[in-house]
Image: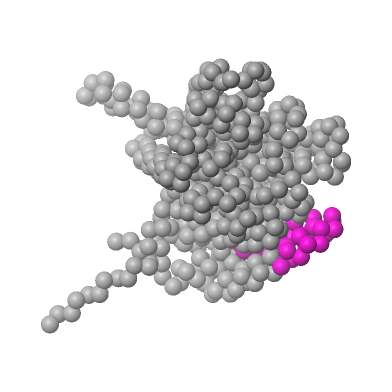
């Protein structure tokens, strides 16, 4: 029998959501400060109002009385699951009233896209967006890329109770150090170091290209943040193609790859132990998968009617890295993706996005660890079929130490793999039902569920509301890797369905 949420459970969930809303209100102070510095009075008024509304809602929820103690797993799953949508709803307020969105649903879409680091945007006239609004978009990327719960825990917002439950409910099970708070603080620290170094280098590049100093710094900060957290938002409509700089593209490729590597591996390298990275099942799977896909992509590009093949290959390399890290940066226009690239190259990018990056990183998708485990399980089954009846086959793999492949590990990997594939198919069929061609519909569905954000012509301002809602759900489900979301849906459904009344004996 499914467990139901009790009234006390709802109070606990509301209390913790209130904490997150108050933290989100503090985050909104960053675009407010930006607006005041650059004398953008209209955005300043919007963010001041949004901060007030968010704080009122957060304080109201915080007043829900709960008993001190640990948060159980069911409550943690609910807090994490609801947080992404609740925060996106509050984020949409200042965005919509900027006048750059056709509908309020478009602003909600961008709020979800920003927090889940999908990077797909339905904004109109991005090139003339205020500094404050851009700062808010990239602040959402930073918060969502590291994880709402990770950032909150790094500031100690939840106290001592429930940290471990909340940490694991966000799809993270590996700790850099045994202590959860120290793990989250390390993740925040390594991000700050890498983004700061990249910002300095890219600022220098932008200054060399003739950009005004303030604009150069802000552009560098924004694309560095978006690159490392594998977000995909950019301050310009043309994405990275706007800069026309191969050195900038090269730096961003390195940033995207760093963001797609597990923070546990980052910690090992940080401690002077680089060997685990090369032994890890994710690294081996990544090299094999990307090598095969790059070969297929190059072969299919040879069929493209494009004069400058060298330039196309250079842009193709960037797009491959953007796809497998699920960042969503683009160095080709949407029209070029569907025309200059052959159908084979187009679908290859979709396959690359579908798998994504490493577990425990900022990347989305199925993850290399699960693909490696599934491959290992196939090898294990073949070995068992060929082994004598008396033999016991043990298959191991390296992932932050040596591990034995167990049925439970294989089941978890296969469950998530199947759920991703089902969602990819449902999204593609929905796109086709709304009039899109098959290949763009498949591509768009994969981009949304894997939180990649490389979009074609299916998603855009004024798109059908039903398809937009489905894409919002796909971004949400992909970011939570399904298990948390499905558990939440089952609990909510069980709570809403009335209990059958016991029959009275006559």
299 vs 95: above or below: above
Kindly indicate the quadrant of the structure image that contains residue 306: top right
430 vs 398: above or below: below
Q: Residue drawn at (77%, 52%), measured in percent from left and top?
A: 130
- Let me know if residue 404 is in the magenta part: no
Give the image location of residue 384, x and y in percent: 28, 25
Give the image location of residue 422, x and y in percent: 39, 42
Question: Going by the picture, which residue comes out furthest to the front?
Answer: 435
**Along the horizontal axis of the image, is 110 left or right of 299?**
right
Foreground residue among 168 and 87 = 87
301 vs 132: above or below: above
Foreground residue among 502 and 472 = 472
Whether residue 310 is visible: yes
Q: Residue drawn at (45%, 36%), measured in percent from left and top?
A: 438
Give the image location of residue 250, x and y in percent: 70, 28
Give the image location of residue 501, x and y in percent: 25, 75
Kindly indicate the quadrant of the structure image that contains residue 257: top right
Q: Which residues are magenta?
A: 20-49
Foreground residue among 61 and 353 = 353
Q: Residue drawn at (47%, 37%), measured in percent from left and top?
A: 437
């Amino acid at each position: 029998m499914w467990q139901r949420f009790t009234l006390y459970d709802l109070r606990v969930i509301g209390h913790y959501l209130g904490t997150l809303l108050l933290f989100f209100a503090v985050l909104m102070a960053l675009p407010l400060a930006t607006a005041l510095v650059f004398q953008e009075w209209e955005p300043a008024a919007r963010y001041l109002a949004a901060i007030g509304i968010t704080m009122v809602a957060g304080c109201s929820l915080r007043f829900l009385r709960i008993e001190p103690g640990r948060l159980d797993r069911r409550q943690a799953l609910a807090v994490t699951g609801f947080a992404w949508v609740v925060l996106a709803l509050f984020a949409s307020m200042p965005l919509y009233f900027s006048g750059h969105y056709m509908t309020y649903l478009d602003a909600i879409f961008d709020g979800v896209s920003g927090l889940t680091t999908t990077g797909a945007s339905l904004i109109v006239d991005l090139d003339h967006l205020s500094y404050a609004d851009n700062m808010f978009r990239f602040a959402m990327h930073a918060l969502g890329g590291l994880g709402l719960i990770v950032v909150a825990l790094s500031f100690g917002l939840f106290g001592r109770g429930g940290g471990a439950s909340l940490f694991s409910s966000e799809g993270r099970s590996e700790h850099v150090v045994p202590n959860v708070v120290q793990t989250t603080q390390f993740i925040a620290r390594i991000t700050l170091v890498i983004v700061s170094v990249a910002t300095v280098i890219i600022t220098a590049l932008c200054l060399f290209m003739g950009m005004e100093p303030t604009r150069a710094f802000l552009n560098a900060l924004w694309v560095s943040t978006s690159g490392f957290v594998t977000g995909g938002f950019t301050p310009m409509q043309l994405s990275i193609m706007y800069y026309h700089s191969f050195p900038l593209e090269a730096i961003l490729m390195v940033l995207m790859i760093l963001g797609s590597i597990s923070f546990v591996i980052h910690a090992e390298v940080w401690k002077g132990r680089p060997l685990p990275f090369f032994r890890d099942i994710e690294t081996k799977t990544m090299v094999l998968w990307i090598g095969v896909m790059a070969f297929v992509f190059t072969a299919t590009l040879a069929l493209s009617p494009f004069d400058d093949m060298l330039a196309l290959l250079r842009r193709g390399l960037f797009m491959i890295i953007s796809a497998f890290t699920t960042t969503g940066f683009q160095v080709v226009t949407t029209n070029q993706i569907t025309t200059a690239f052959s159908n084979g190259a187009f679908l290859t990018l979709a396959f690359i996005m579908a798998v994504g990056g490493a577990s425990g990183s900022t990347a989305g998708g199925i993850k290399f660890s699960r693909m490696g485990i599934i491959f290992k399980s196939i090898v294990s089954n073949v070995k068992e079929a060929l082994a004598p009846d008396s033999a016991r086959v043990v298959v191991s793999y390296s992932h932050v130490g040596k591990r034995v492949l167990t049925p439970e590990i294989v089941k978890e990997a296969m469950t998530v793999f199947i759920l991703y594939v089902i969602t990819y198919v449902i999204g593609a069929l929905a796109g086709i039902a709304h009039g899109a061609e098959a290949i763009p519909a498949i591509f768009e569905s994969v981009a949304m569920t894997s939180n990649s954000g490389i979009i074609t012509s299916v998603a855009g301002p004024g798109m059908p509301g039903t398809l937009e809602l489905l894409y919002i759900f796909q971004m949400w489900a992909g970011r939570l890797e399904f298990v948390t979301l499905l558990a939440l849906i089952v609990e909510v459904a069980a709570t809403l369905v009335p209990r059958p009344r016991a029959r009275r004996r006559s």
